[in-house]
Amino acid sequence: MTSHPMTPILLCGGSGTRLWPLSRQSYPKQFSPLLGQESLFQTSVLRLAGPGFNPPVIVTGNDFRFIVTQQMDEIGVPPAAVLLEPVPRNTGPAILAALLHVAASDPGALVLIAPSDHVVADVAGFRSAIAKAAMAADQGAIVTFGIRPDRPETGYGYLELADHAGEGAVPLVRFVEKPDRDTARAMLSEGRYLWNAGLFLARADRLIAAYRTHAPDLIAPVTRAVLEARTDLGFLRLDPTAWATAPDISIDFAVMERCAELSVIPFDGGWSDLGGWETVWRAMGPDAAGVATSGPAAAIDCTDTLLRAEGEGQVLIGLGLDKMIAVAMPDAVLVAPMDRAQDLRRAVAHLKTQGASQATTFPKDHRPWGWFESLALGPRFQVKRIHVNPGASLSLQSHHHRAEHWVVVQGTARVTVDGETRLMSENNAIYIPLGATHRLENPGKLPMVLIEVQTGAYLGEDDIVRYEDGYGRG
Amino acid sequence: MTSHPMTPILLCGGSGTRLWPLSRQSYPKQFSPLLGQESLFQTSVLRLAGPGFNPPVIVTGNDFRFIVTQQMDEIGVPPAAVLLEPVPRNTGPAILAALLHVAASDPGALVLIAPSDHVVADVAGFRSAIAKAAMAADQGAIVTFGIRPDRPETGYGYLELADHAGEGAVPLVRFVEKPDRDTARAMLSEGRYLWNAGLFLARADRLIAAYRTHAPDLIAPVTRAVLEARTDLGFLRLDPTAWATAPDISIDFAVMERCAELSVIPFDGGWSDLGGWETVWRAMGPDAAGVATSGPAAAIDCTDTLLRAEGEGQVLIGLGLDKMIAVAMPDAVLVAPMDRAQDLRRAVAHLKTQGASQATTFPKDHRPWGWFESLALGPRFQVKRIHVNPGASLSLQSHHHRAEHWVVVQGTARVTVDGETRLMSENNAIYIPLGATHRLENPGKLPMVLIEVQTGAYLGEDDIVRYEDGYGRG
């Protein structure tokens, strides 16, 4: 690593539908453990943590703020700052906002800009590539990372490199848009073309200067959004009025493709953007028959197939499949040939027209205090599992149309009903009559789980009157 | 119909794994509503009920006795008798037992022997075929029904007919074993070959005589099993010792293929044995693209594909599929090409070696009093939905390792805990401490549903001490 530490800027916005049903609008893929135990976001944070790195700056959306802090808390890496975009505006404004935030206290800081939903197999190799890049960046270069292709991929943009001998950063000739199959094949055999991984390393002031030169129209609105940002429970809320006037544009289009002097550090340590089920299948490391499975999934006589069983207690059997993808979750199942996975957008659009909540909403509904899921929904009742994080607290609330029965099945709860507070542990139950003000807290050091049985004529989430909320919700 | 009514004998034993995961050992396919609202068993009973028919005699296994009576109760057709096979012995002994039971009170009775898991599209046509057959049977014929083939099916046995002009029963030349593809094609174009549907109509005494002639070794053990049968809660339990000595053989092998003078009534009113997912797909009536769906399943760009979403609140998306089957249930998902569906046996065998309960057990566990299903299973808790039929009652019981919380969410319950009884309705809750004797009854006229939250170190179904049980269970 270089002599002075660098600051990671992690982009953690919404994600598309290309990994539906595991990735949905309400809980995009970076928060899920697609490979291994940790979420993609957590592995992305850990990959850029430790000696040589400052705490990261995160840019995310309002809906994900508590997921971000909870997931960082779980891995013991506190953020330097969490910037909240009032609405998504692509990477151009998001990165500029983070740069301005970093530069405000240290204009010469080295920053490493990275997505939070990619994977890297060889982390040590990745770090030594970063160290090389840092040396060039220290001397004023804007460095991007290029992945050596191992197949004629048409889903990525490419970086064309100059002829260059020796170690270290290589001058970039130009960006190449996503190619067709023949062009991709030609580039693969040529050797001077690398995949554009969307990773950048430079001094903050150098990058801001590049914005000033190539994307001057971003400077004013984003600067104002940062200067007028509001601190809220530790989050930095970019000013929505200023933000709304920022153009919606990627950093590649706004700045990088217009920069004459970019340098590239090649890297071939097993990178993937997990941009679709086919790349997930590849990154999972299929066996000799080309089969990759996750969860209680069994592939019988299958070839080149991905099977994922994501639900608790749900088995998935693939029998005689070739080049297929099947992903089973408790509330949604997808089956498609591997080469059709990029049409998932249409499937999700179809679900939306049907009004199916599965199009956008995850079965586990994440809240600032933990999460809940519906276990059963009947004509006049609903059963939920409610998971409250240690130290967390739900709002003081009441309902007009439902009564609730709570049974604690794990941990300790502090429950207040109409002003009376009691501690409850495993196997204790309490009744919340219709209209009663109530609050649920987890005062303990371990997660608390309770089963809620609701009865009433209307059981929607919007039947809630909030009197007091530790998370600033209305 | 003929002048004197006939008695249906419905065979309702266990079923294979060819429709897994919808059909499982604990709840075979005939009890599921595979097509339409009623179960296959119910439509089979209704098809042979009404004017011209006596109440049916059912032959089934011990595990299914309460499902049979409940499903018949639901459609308002009481059985004449329900014979319980101590162990399955194939159709030969099962049919003979039913014949002996019928003949004991009316030796000359006309009986119509039918499986309970087939479908017939044209019920009126089917009944007029039966009326024709009854005329022949009245005069001493053993009549079987032959289905006019509409494809070169290799999964069925065939009946070769004699050349015959005119209406009515046609002499049978011979039974033909399941053919290969070429033979099936030849038979289809020939026109004198019909599918063997496993339906027989004759006088009871005529059939018993045929058993005496062609399968004399069945007579003694089955006669003894019927004579020494024990009546138990309205069921007729065939004597297990005698039954154990009966050969395991089908009626085709034991009797029919050895009978010289069988008559055939041709029928072409849309019959299917629903013997595998491909025939289910066919019977569902695929659309112009060959797509058949059931439940919240969406087929996008699919051809010749079957999609079934059987779970509450679980969507199934098939994208770009051709000649595929996908069946999604809350606890199990199957994906296979349509022409591999017959290998399902292997998939289920694989699950068994893994110790997966889904191999044999249905998520809804049917009991004499109704059913329950597990909604969530945690480290020291389980949540169940319990559905109790009107008038039904669970045993008086206690548990050594768990306490239970009950919340009634539908209907009315009568609950007894340690000798104290109370009535509970929607939104009432009660606590059953570990060790307490308790009983749950539904005294009402509507189903009663409650949510049970169990807590404890061991939550297996076998932690139960039964003090008193209305269904004769230990």
Image (cartoon, coloured by chain):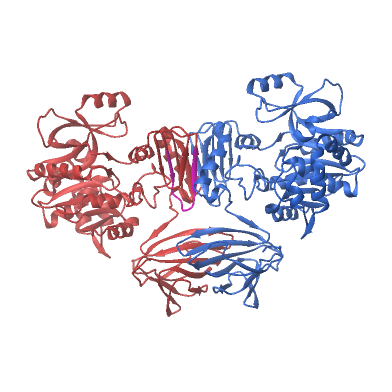
Chain colours: A red, B blue
In the image: residue B11, left or right of residue A356? right
Q: Is residue A313 magenta?
A: yes
Q: Dominant secondary structure of the magenta stretch?
A: strand
Q: Residue visible at 86% across and 26% down?
A: B167
Q: Residue visible at 60% across and 47% down?
A: B24
Tell which of A96 and A278 is nearer to you.
Answer: A278
Q: In what quadrant of the picture does the C terminus of chain A appear?
A: bottom left
In the image: residue B217, left or right of residue A103? right
In the image: residue A200, left or right of residue A288? left
Q: How far across and how far down the image is residue A88, in percent?
A: 31, 49
Identify whether B351 is placed above or below B291.
below
Q: Residue visible at 32% across and 60% down?
A: A66
Q: How far across and how far down the image is residue A141, in percent?
A: 10, 41
Tell which of B1 and A63 is nearer to you.
Answer: B1
Magenta highlight range: A306-318
Examine the image and state in which quarter residue A380 appears: bottom right
Examine the image and state in which quarter residue A92 appears: top left
Q: Is residue B396 magenta?
A: no
In the image: residue B393, left or right of residue A164? right
Examine the image and state in which quarter residue B450 appears: bottom right
Identify whether A343 is placed above or below B444.
above
